[in-house]
Structure formats: structure tokens, C-alpha cells
Image (cartoon, rainbow, N blue to C red):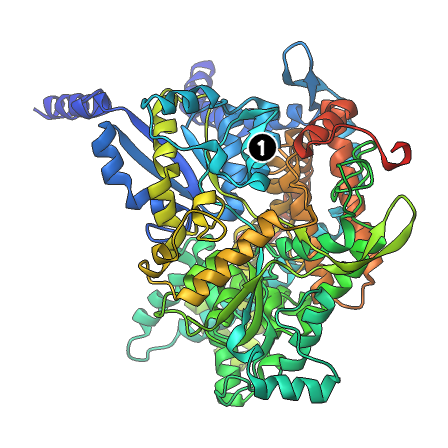
Amino acid sequence: MARRDSQGWLFVLPAVIWLLAVNVGPAVYMVGHSFFAPRYSEERGASVRRWVGLENYRRFFAEDQLVHSIWFTVGVAVVSVAAELALGLLFAVMAWRATAFGIRLWRGLFAVPMLMAPVAVAYLATTVFAHEVGVINGLLHRLLGVPFESLPRWRSDRFWATLAVILVEVWQWTPFCFIVFLAALAAQPEDLREAALVDGAGEWQVFWHVTLPCLRPVLLTVLLLRLIEALKLFDVPYGLTRGGPGTWTQTYSMWIKEVAFTRYDMGLASAMSTMLLLALTALGIAVLPLLRKQLAISEEP
Amino acid sequence: MKRRAWLATALLFLLGCGGSAKDNVPTIRIAVYASGPRGAISGPFYYWKEQWEQETGAKLEIAEIPFAELHDKVFADLRAGTARYDGIVGPAWFYGDYILGDYIIPIDDYIERGTKGEFPFWDPDTVVPPLRPLHMWGGKWYGVPNDGDAHILYYRKDILEDPKWQERFRRETGHELPVPPQTWEELAEVAEFFHGKDWNDDGEPDFGITMHLAVGGQGFFHYMSLSAPYVVLPGAKKDRFHNVYWLDPETLEPLIDSPGHQRALAMLRRLQKAGPPGQTGWQLKEAWDRFLNGKAIFCYSWGDVGSLAQDTSQSRVKGKIGCSALPGSYEVWDRQKGEWVRFETPNRVGNTVGGSWHGVISRFSKHPELVYHLFAFHAQKEVNMFHCVTGWTGIDPGRTFHFPEPYGDASITDYVSAGWDENDAREYTKAYYQNYYHAQTYLDYLRIPGTMEMWRQLDRRLHEAVVDHSIPEAEILRRVKEDWNRILDRLSAELGRERLKRLYQQSIGYEGGSAEGD
């Protein structure tokens, strides 16, 4: 038994080392860093790191951008992930049994946005959302005759800038939800559906009472993955709006980047990253039991 | 067999990683503002690359970095000491951070050796006086001159001098059309008069003024140069209350919320209404294009506009522009007395806003002499003059030899033979000369550590001001002051308040004293 145990440890050792070196180690270093701050040393003629205890966390809570950046990040994450899940599911259900000519090609093309680098998408989006020469405003002006002064200011109005960020997010990540849902639908046992139809259920009833409950574990997994990603949102607002108007679309991650690399205030940036890590871990801890429960239900005979 | 193949592959890989003949060629890498091989600031380095490499036998690598990331990338490299960049072609506002970290080296010795023919020669006296301090710290030269940045006013001379429009203006306002406007109030009135009228006969309403006001679009420079005449009280010398703009040199208190600034911000908002609605989301190029396409009467910006106006592939205004130093204000806020002071002639404040992009040598470079050689090569009279008269280079006037008679020793034909319209060239160089030599006082250049951070906050708050006019000017500026105080407090905690104050005083050339004791 002992030999089997030591063999087992040997097999997982590379993974443990990797995890310690790449994940746990840097995380511990980051948390440690959050208790230090630079102070100028006359002796050395340069700034040196000094222990400051919880000072960085006190400064974190005193930052005036804290509340807004959290609300903005959470708001965009919730709205965009909800839209991605809804649209992804809708398109997956539509494509599931579709037999139209070229459907496979369409499914492939639908995945393209997901394959693009988010920062590239953001820069492309600047041409779509430009005020006078952008694709959307160009169409509104030429086709609908909307005067220039009434066109949406996608990058300099709070509402439109928020919407632009959400639209780009939804455009890029709906295909991810679509592909996962489509795969899950294809893997569903056909006999369940047939039995329900034989029992006289309509298509809508079958979807609501058979298909959707079977999809629930996948839905929860996608929700968790997408929420974690969306809460770290950086590239799209960075490239598209630069956090503007003012600091309206500045997300929490953009703020960390600024504190770390513009202010070079690594202590505060580490404290902010630690708080994000704690929040995401809490989210995972909250959702995982639900996921386990759903998996247990779906595995019941 | 398979094992041998693996071994051979591994050996080839190791050889690939090892030295080669190519490594014997000294190579330097410079970080530069990104705008491509035919773009502003980076373009000239590509243009002369081959010739410089032939002359020196060295190899030049050009690392282009976008404006918004330049500070972060350069200082991440310098702080880590990884020496990715041997030289940095950056803006003058980096100096506080450069000097504090001791990241760059002085070049006085190289300049001296340049006079003996060891390096390409450039004469420090040819740098116009207001720009010289931007290349220096504590009496030593650190930067090699390249670009001279300052805002001037561009206007459509053909329209403003058209008797038809002058008559219409007189009828509507009851007074003469001022060409060029002497104060910001006059400029706003003219811009408002033309805004919404089809004065270029293209069948569409046109604009009074065009500005780049997007976050990260360098719009805060618009505010700096506009606000200076309301804020900078001229005096015989720089003391606590005269000739200062940013911070109180004795207390480091930000001066950004003074009544002078409030009036200036109200003026910025007024001007904004006489421009395209989309300009709140515009970067430089988008704003300049409206002027170059003949859609706006005014544009106040850097020298690029004047030289780009000569390129008929992107400009419809060649031969139609007038230029002047920026307008002033009859009233200036006196902080000491706490009241507005009225002048008989407008208070015109010379400016050097912008980057005045130029090269400095990294302390970590293994080839500092080569880096200096490269920058000195670009600073030579012939090369620099070529840049100044060539539109795409982004190099603007800032050397004495850029100015034709009667202001300097250049000839107007230098400009005309480079494709300039003669009148445009005269207007352009005259305006720069006025700005550098005929102002009552000058706008300080902020060069302390944390400058970039302070300007970013200013940029954001100004954007709030232009997208939401319901927020009072005083409130916007109060927020900027709060932001700046937070930054200064943090820097004080790190560096010590006294040390930070000394750095600020050094950077603006403050030697103490106040008007009270004078």
C-alpha cells in the first residue's frame, strides 16, 4: 500500500512542482509584496523596499476609484456574460438540428471572433465605433440620415462607451458559449428526448424540462469560466476607450496595471491583485458546490 | 538513429543560440515613439539608418512603442536594469523619473569631444533659449536636441481676410474681425461666428475650431497652453507668485484650482462648442485632419500641422494658412493679492508644451558613445534642418537655424525648395519665433517624478469636463487638485517632501524669494 502511495506521489510530483513554481510561488510573492513600499534611502541614493504592514491595504480602501471600478467591472461582467450565455444557447439550439447547406462552415466561421487576440479586437473596434467615419455611425448617418451632432458618441459618452465595451465582449465570447453548448447538446442522450415526445410533450416542454436541465452543469461551468475571465477584463476597454470618458470605463485590472506600471507602486498593485485573487477564489468556492450538486443530479440513474 | 537525430537537432539549437560573426558588430537599440518608418519622430531614424550604419559600422535597432505605453515600458526596463534600450527618444517630462533613478548620463563631455571632430557636431547655442532647460538638469546637458515642441495658432487666412466674411462679421457683431485674434475671448467669438456656416462652399456646415480631446489623445496640452495666460502672472523673476504655473514652489500645493484655471476651463468648454461634436473622442490625427481638410477655421497645435498642410495628398489648405503665437488674456489671476490683474496688452505666455522629443543615453548601455553618435548625427544642422522642413518627420522648429531672415540665418528658399508655400513658411516660422522670443513670460515645464501620473489624472478630469458640462469648473479642478495631492503625498512618503520640493524647484529654475520681500 505504502509503495502504491509513493508511486502515486511520484506521478503527481511534476504537476505539484509546476503548480508551486508557476502559480503558488508567484502568488505568495505577490501577497508578501503587498506589505512593502518603496522609501528613499539617502545612504544608497535610491529607493529601497521597506516593511509597511497593512499600509497598502489602507491606501487601497482610500482610493477614490475603488468603488466605481469595481461596480463597472462587475456590471459589465454580469451583463455581458448573461448576454453571451443567452445568445450562445440560442444559437446552439438553432444550429443543433439544423441541416441547411453550409451549416458546418457557418459553425466554423462563428468561432472566428473567439480566436482573435482581445487587444486586436479592441483596436479593430475603434474603427467600428469611430464618431464620424466609424462603421456604425456611418450607416446611421448615410442610411437613416442621423445628423452628425446626434450620432452616438461611442468613446466619449458614458452610456455609449459602456455599451460599446459590452458589445465587443459579447461579440467575441458568445462563440465560446455557442461551441460548448453545441457540444453538450450533441452529447445528450437522444432517448430521453424521444421518450418525452412519445409521452406527448411539445418541443418547448421538451426543451424546458429535458434539454435545459441536462445542460445545467455545462451552463454553470461556462458561467464560472466566463465570469472569472470577465472580472479580469482589460484589453477591450484599454484599446477601445482608454478607460474614458474620464475614468468611467476603467476596469479593476486596468487600474492595477496603471498603479503597477505608471505609478510603479508595486506594493499597492500587489494589495489590489491580492484582493482580486481573494474575490475570484470566493466566487469559485461559492459556485463549485452548486456545480458538484448539478453534476451529481445529472449522473443519477 | 532517432537518438542521433535528436542529438544533431540539439547541437544545431545550441549553435544557433551561441555567438556568430554578426555578434561582433556593435548593436544599439533605441526606444522611440511609434509612428512607423514614415511617421513623426520614429520616421527620421529609419530614414538615416543605413547611412548611419555605414558611417559607424554599427547596427541600429529601432523599438517603436505607442505613446500610451512609452512611459511604462521604458521605466519598467530602466527600473529592472535589463538594458533593453541603449537610448530613449522620449519626451522632456520623463526627466524627473530619469534623474531620480539616475538612469541617464550627462553628455557635456561628448559635446566637448564633438567640437574636436570625435562625434558629429551640433552647437548647444543653436537651441532656442526656452527649449534649452528641457534638455538639461542641474546645469548639465543630458538630452541631444531633436524636436522643438510648442503650440501655435493656425487659422484660415484666406477666409478671415476675405472682405465678404469681414463685412458679415462686422454686421453681426458690430466690430472688426480680429486677424489673428489677440485673446482667447476674441478667438472664441470668431470661432462661434464661423461655426455651423458653410464658409468653404462644400454644401455642409463647417466648424469654428478643431481639437483632440479624447482620453489619451494629448488633449491636456490644449488646456495647458490655453490656461497659461490666465494663470501665469508675469514678473521680473521667477518667485513664489510670478512666472509659475504648476505648484507653489515653497509648499508644493497644486495651483490647479485657482480662479485663473476656472476661467480657462470655462473657455475650453466654450471653444469645444464651436467645434465638431465628435472631437471629445479624437486623437491628434483626427483633429488635425479636420483643419487640413478645410473644415475648421482654427486649430492650435504643434508644428506638425504647418508642415503637413504642405502635403497636398492630405491637405487642402496649402497656401491658405496664417499662423501666430497663441492668444493671451487681458486679465491674469494674482494669487498673492487674490484678485484679477488687468493688463493694457494681452498677457501672452510662451509655451513649450509637448514632448520636445529627443534622445537621452541609458546608464545601462554598453555603447553610450555610439548612442550619442546617433543622436548627434540627427542633431547636426543639415540633418535637423531637413527634418524641420519635411512634413512627415514630426520635427518642429526649435533651433536658431530653423528661422529665416529677419529672425535667423535660414533662407525661406530652404522651405520653398522642400515643397512649402512661401507665405505659409513665413507665417509658420514667424509664429514660432514670436512664441520663443516675444512672450512676456513662459509656461513652466513640469519635470518632477510622477509627472506622467499627474498629467494622466489631469487628462481624465478634463475629459470629464468636456463630456459633461453640468459639472462646475471649480469641482473638476478641485478633483484634479485632490488627485495631485494624493500623488504628491505618496511621492513625499517615498522621497521625502523636502527632496521632492528641491527637485521641483530645480526643474523649474526656482531660486527662492517671493514678491512680498521684493
Q: Position of residue A292 (x, y in %)?
A: 60, 47
Q: Position of residue A59 (x, y in %)?
A: 77, 35
* Residue B46, picture quadrant: top left
In this rendering, position of residue B419 left or right of residue B361: left
Where disc 1 sits, the SS reads helix
In this rendering, position of residue B109 left or right of residue B175: left
Crowding at dot 1, Cα within 10 Å, few <14 / some 14-19 / many 20+, comes out as many
Q: Residue at x 68, y 28 (%)?
A: B506
Q: Residue at x 31, y 24 (%)?
A: B117
In this rendering, position of residue B212 left or right of residue A157: left
Identity of the residue furthest to the top in this view: A43
* Residue A248, picture quadrant: bottom right
In the displayed structure, B315 sits above or below B49; it is below
**Residue type highlighted by circle 1:** Tyr
Q: Is residue A74 visible?
A: no
Q: Position of residue B68 (x, y in %)?
A: 53, 47
Q: Position of residue A228 (x, y in %)?
A: 59, 48
Q: Residue at x 66, y 19 (%)?
A: A49
Residue of label 1: B95
In the displayed structure, B78 sits above or below B157; it is above
